[in-house]
Image: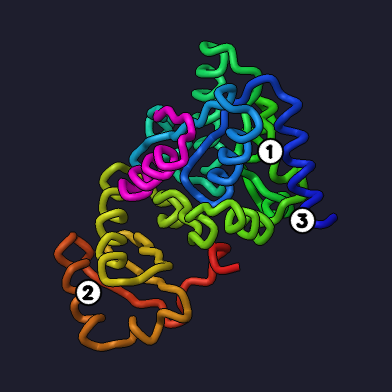
Amino acid sequence: MQLEEKARVLRAELASVSSLVVAYSGGVDSAYLLHVAHEVLGERVHGILADSPSLPRHEHDAAIALAAARGWPLKVIVTHELENPLYVANPVNRCYYCKQELFDRLDAYAREHHVARLAYGENADDAGEFRPGQMAAKELAVLAPLRDAGLTKADIRELSRRAGLPTADKAAQPCLSSRLPTGQSVTREALALIEAGEKVLRESGFHVYRLRHLGETARVQVAPEELPRLNDGALRQSLAAELNALGFAQVEFDPEGYRGASLR
């Protein structure tokens, strides 16, 4: 199917619902979904940003600023996944409990405001991956219009460029909990430490980065093309000192770099 046809299929699906809540994070997929839904449904679409300690403050602020700049309707709600011991235990399906909390909150909002359906930004690439959150979406019949239209991440980036969205080339930013290894408890303190550490990396000029919280050790990962900067001895020494000051006893620098989905 050609890209233009996929875009038409997306608009047709959105036009088929009377009103819609869109789970919005400010990322590539959800921003494009909210953009098109707003064009199709106007005031009948409700963008919802879920706020919790796993969402970096700069991502929270950027998502709100983008919605305001584009005129998208947006409400911020607070989610409480950290009150669920099953989430805090950080099992391999941690994302299920996060999405379950998110969709339960969105469902309650939809019922209160008489909104017909819920939707989120799963795309066609996600369909073949291990995504525990998909089960939570199925349980509440949450729509995935991008996936249903066959839109891949590359498609969404291209359509976002055509729409003039600044998210077109944005790197993926999974929640801060993803920086913790499976089985290491998710705590507010750990998330705050990860956020502070990644702020150091961001303010040092890195664009794609992860700070892995491995107990007392921080493992720094950056995109392969940014490794030459990271290999600068003086910069490494400065980064290590700042991360030590935050509370990490040891700092490791991954020699292979970060090779996540954000680079595809």
Q: Which of marks 1 and 3 is nearer the N terminus?
A: 3
Q: Residues within 10 Å of mark 2 (few under 14, many from 20)?
A: many
Q: Mark 2 points at which residue?
A: 240
- In the rendered image, the quadrant that contains the N terminus is bottom right
Real-space Cα separation, disc 1 to disc 3, in angstroms: 17 Å
Q: Is residue 67 toward the left or the right of residue 36 in the image?
A: left
Which residue occupies the foreground of this view, 156 or 183? Answer: 156
Q: Which amino acid is tagged 3?
A: Leu
Mark number displayed over residue 144: 1
Residue at 31% across, 46% down: 57
| Place of residue 167 in the rendered image (x, y in percent of width and height, measured from the top left) | 50, 54
Res 194 quadrant in image: bottom left
What amino acid does circle 2 point to?
A: Ala
Disc 3 to disc 2, C-alpha distance: 45 Å
Location of residue 246 with respect to 71 vertically, above or below: below
The amino acid at mark 1 is Ala
> Which of the two labelled residues, at mark 1 and mark 2, occupies the earlier sequence position?
1
* Magenta run includes residue 65: yes
Residue at which label 3 appears = 3
Foreground residue, 215 or 254?
Answer: 254
Circles 1 and 2: CB atoms closer than 8 Å? no
Discs 1/2, front? 1
Q: Which residue is drawn at 53% across and 26% down?
A: 46
Frontmost of labels 1 and 3 is 3
Q: What stretch is highlighted in magenta?
A: 55-76
Q: Is mark 1 on a helix, strand or loop?
A: loop
Kindly report the secondary structure that dominates the magenta region of the rendered protein.
helix
Question: The residue tagged with tag 2: helix, strand or loop?
Answer: helix
Above or below 217: residue 33: above
